Amino acid sequence: MPRPLPRLPLSAVFPPAPGPGTPGDPGVIAPGGPFRRVSAERAVVLGGPAAILLQVAHPLVAEGVAVHSDYAAGPARRLLGTLQAALTVTFGDTDQARAAAREVGRAHAPVRGTTRSAVPGTPAGTPYRANDPDLALWVHATLVWTARRVAERYAGVRLTPAEREGHWQESKPFARLFAVPDQVLPGTVAEFDDYVARTLRGLVVTDAARAVARDVLTQRTSPPLPGVAALARSITADVLPARIAGAYGLPLSPGRRAAAGLTRGLLRAARPVLPRGVAQWPHAEVARRRVQALQPRASTRQG
């Protein structure tokens, strides 16, 4: 009989903010711009499963995860570890961001090999490695695309065309820290969207990818929260492109459409009245205070 998978305490869903860092150090991501604005929203975490499923729908990523990853041993912990690293890179100071990226890089360094079986477009024996620039670009693209989509749909973040451009441009330092070189990064947001669309057309959902999906979309909090897994599947089906969702066995059925729509409506209605400390990750407030630490105070005018 298989051993039960570990459960995750609810407190782990709220990762602690990093230390205050070096006063005045903005970090690697431009402060005050659309990338941090989008990433600050707690609601963006709703897109985590969709991002993972998009990543492993690339056969080479799926093979690396199947052979080298510990998702099956503790998918929730793995997802939250990824979340904490992304938040630290986005909102930490320069040293904190680089340290978080190095830790992820060390974990990914052994991930290399060749595919064990053929899938459409990828013959058996195709080599892969986690720090391959093209694979690293796809992983980065799933995070950027999903965060933007969830922020707009579920948090009510409205990005103008110029802000969408800024969101993509400001994501590039993040990408560089994770082995994505400039020569493979799309130049503009239009080129980025075209790259995502092209890659989506070539994705193949394998049995290995479906196994990851089952692990990621299984509710394992302690204490258990009834209905959370079903809601996660509904939101994931809503966020994913229809073809990919269907390939994972997650079609946007009327029930899922209704659940996602209700969640969307409730979150968008609540967002304007939520305190910033509730709606946003604490990492964002730490970053704001750090950047402002060395800024001169405005002088008080005498009447």
Image: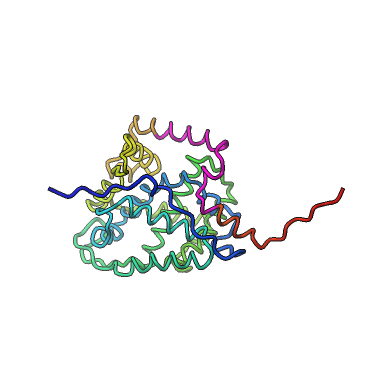
Q: Residue at x 68, y 61 (%)?
A: 295
Asked if residue 212 lies in the magenta stretch, the reply is no
Visual colour scheme = rainbow
Q: Is residue 261 magenta?
A: yes
The residue lying furthest to the right in this view is 303
Q: Nearer the viewer, residue 274 or 147?
A: 274
Q: Is residue 262 above or below residue 13?
A: above
Q: Position of residue 270 (x, y in %)?
A: 52, 34
Residue at position x 52%, y 56% in the image: 168
Majority SS type along the magenta span: helix
Q: Tally the marks.
A: 0
Q: Looking at the image, which residue sits at the far left? A: 1
Residues shaded magenta: 260-284
Q: Nearer the viewer, residue 5 or 162?
A: 5
Up the image or down, 79 lies above or below 254; here it is below
- Residue 211 in picture, x, y percent from top left: 24, 50
Q: Nearer the viewer, residue 2 or 248?
A: 2
Q: Looking at the picture, how far across and down is residue 265, in whole percent?
A: 48, 32
Q: Where does residue 231 sit, x and y in percent of width and height?
A: 35, 37
Q: Nearer the viewer, residue 197 or 82?
A: 82
Q: Residue at x 56, y 44 (%)?
A: 276
